[in-house]
Image: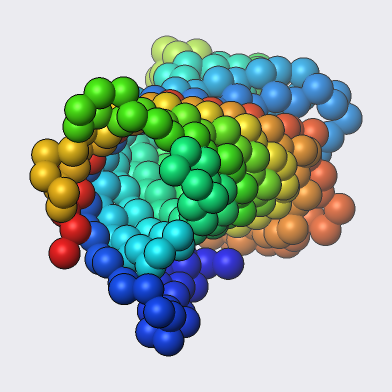
Amino acid sequence: MKKINILLMPFIFVSLSISAADEIKWGMSIGYEKIDYGITLENTDSGTSSSDIVAPNTISEGTMSYGAVALGIDMRAGNHSFSVKSANGDSDDLMPSYDFPFTGWKNVDSNERSETSLNYSYKLNNNWSVAAGMYFGENEREFTHTKTFPARDNLPFNWDTQELGMQTSESEGTYIAAVYQDQLADKWFWYGKLGYQTSTFDIDQKYVYGEQAVAADAWLNAGGTQAELVARFSNGTGLYEWDIVYAVETEGSAAVLGLGLVYVITPLDTVTFGYERKNYSYDKGDVVKYTYTGLSGNDSGSIDDAITGTTFDEEADYLTITYRHQF
């Protein structure tokens, strides 16, 4: 289910609630979230293909911390409540600067991350409620990977290599949770939440892989020039590029833990201080697409039997402060 479908759900809720005897109460919220996000890529399979996101028998960990403004709208009718929340943020350098995606490579990346959730809860009594909902998360990672492969076999040039592109990671899931709340003091309440979530995790990556022949010192010391070197290549430039597209799909599950404090300013206004942690674990991905298109007279094609031995783990910690007003 895509985010557009999630955002249409409030209208379905409204149409179902119009005929209900309970009065519908609307609320809007704005908040700030401090998010610590991490991802671990592990490949324990030594025989997988070149489509691996990290090299065989390696572990790569990426982290980023960022702030996000979260906007929400909610509706309540009797024991039923429904809400939609969306948050967006950005950060640099999710993945390591060195030895990623493979040994000897350098990495620079920038990230734009968005999260949207649809939530429904039913109040069982004054303390207990059950909740269920859907979640959509997306991270757009713009990256540059570079490495120089030195001259070998007495060849007079090095290869300066670059991968330049965009990787989009999408996670979609459904969850169920139990929520307990109680009053601490006048105008102060607390709550705890424990849940379980199942998710799919898709990675789509598009990038240009380029290698440029660069004159080695031995060639230059012998009186040769860069122009003379590249003129010896069939395309006259010594630059070979491929437009590469691949997609990986996997699925997994997560535990969800939440704690929070609610301060009642007035009967219509509240401030919530919250903490939430999610920890996802995904299986090895299936490569559903892998194509390469030559951009400088080199070969094009596809790899139909590509596999990946990479597993994925995500974790996220949220510290939030949210103001809500009820109409």
Image vertical order of residue 74 relative to residue 61, above or below: below
Residue in the picture at 37% in, 45% down: 113
Residue 303 coordinates in the image, percent (x, y): 78, 55
Residue 195 coordinates in the image, percent (x, y): 60, 38
Residue 110 coordinates in the image, percent (x, y): 34, 37
Image vertical order of residue 24 relative to residue 272, above or below: below
Q: Residue furthest left?
A: 266
Q: Is residue 226 left or right of residue 193?
A: left
- Report the coloring of the rendering: rainbow
User: Which quadrant would residue 291 be assigned to in this image?
Assistant: bottom right
Residue 264 appears anywhere in the view: yes
User: Which quadrant would residue 54 be assigned to in this image?
Assistant: top right
Residue in the picture at 33% in, 29% down: 183
Relative depth, front residue between 241 and 51: 51
Q: Is residue 244 left or right of residue 93?
A: right
Residue in the picture at 25% in, 23% down: 185
Q: Is residue 225 left or right of residue 32?
A: right
Relative depth, front residue between 224 and 177: 177
Residue in the picture at 71% in, 59% down: 289
Residue 142 coordinates in the image, percent (x, y): 39, 43
Residue 280 appears anywhere in the view: no
User: Which quadrant would residue 312 be assigned to in this image?
Assistant: top right
